[in-house]
Image (cartoon, rainbow, N blue to C red):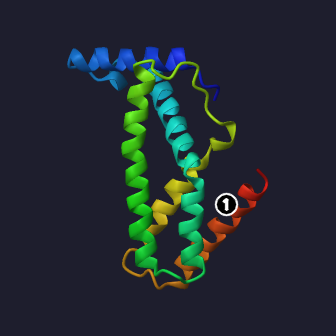
């Protein structure tokens, strides 16, 4: 996806217009709704990417057994939630056009998928964080992230 700030702002305004009319943007203009969702996912991935070191350090603590699976999950979910709030503020700044000529970092594309996967793993193993499958899964993600970070 090629980020186009002007188009993103246009889609945000269209979404808000439908909302103010009491209509569903999805039902009224499905293609534009999906396009807006793609932009918002890319922005979220960008903000997660900006915090990649925090995610990597957290994963490293777990992989090195400095913290438990439960501590990892709690800290991961807390960090993710903080970034979701940050993302909302960032979107508002973009919509207000305070951030002129903003561009996404191309390295951030797809990073949100990793975060979504980690979230799913935390949810899947919430009853058994001691499970070696959970440990192996997080370790595998950590090693892949570490390799990507080393290539920067």
Q: Nearer the viewer, residue 45 or 136?
A: 45
Coordinates of residue 63 in the picture (x, y in percent)? 59, 78
Residue picked out by circle 1? 145
Coordinates of residue 86 in the picture (x, y in percent)? 40, 42
How packed mark 1 is, by other alpha carbons closer than 10 Å (few <14, some 14-19, many 20 or more), is: some
Query: Quick one: quadrant of the N terminus?
Result: top right
Q: Is residue 137 visible?
A: no
**Relative to 136, is 40 on the left or the right?**
left
The quadrant in which residue 132 appears is: bottom right
Secondary structure under tag 1 reads helix
Q: Nearer the viewer, residue 70 or 26?
A: 70
**Relative to 28, is 140 on the left or the right?**
right
Q: Residue at x 43, y 58 (%)?
A: 79
Q: Nearer the viewer, residue 25 or 9?
A: 9
Position above or below: 97 against 64: above
**Relative to 16, is 63 on the left or the right?**
right
Q: Residue at x 56, y 50 (%)?
A: 113
Coordinates of residue 151 in the picture (x, y in percent)? 79, 54
**Relative to 25, is 6 on the left or the right?**
right
Identify the residue at the far right of this view.
151
Position above or below: 66 against 98: below
Q: Is residue 48 visible?
A: yes
Q: Residue at x 46, y 61 (%)?
A: 119
Q: Residue at x 22, y 17 (%)?
A: 20
Number of numbered discs present? 1
The quadrant in which residue 106 appears is: top right
Coordinates of residue 149 in the picture (x, y in percent)? 71, 56
């Amino acid at each position: 996806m090629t980020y186009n700030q002007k188009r993103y702002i246009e889609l945000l305004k269209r979404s808000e217009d439908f909302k103010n009319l009491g209509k569903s943007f999805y039902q009224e203009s499905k293609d534009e709704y999906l396009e807006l969702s793609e932009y918002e996912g890319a922005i979220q991935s960008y903000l997660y990417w900006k915090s990649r070191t925090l995610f990597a350090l957290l994963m490293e603590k777990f992989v090195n057994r400095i913290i438990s699976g439960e501590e990892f999950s709690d800290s991961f979910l807390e960090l993710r939630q903080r970034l979701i709030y940050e993302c909302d503020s960032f979107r508002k700044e973009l919509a207000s056009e305070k951030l002129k000529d903003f561009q996404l970092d191309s390295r951030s594309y797809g990073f949100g998928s990793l975060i979504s996967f980690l979230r799913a793993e935390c949810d899947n193993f919430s009853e058994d964080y001691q499970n070696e499958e959970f440990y192996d899964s997080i370790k595998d993600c950590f090693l892949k992230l570490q390799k990507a970070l080393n290539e920067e």
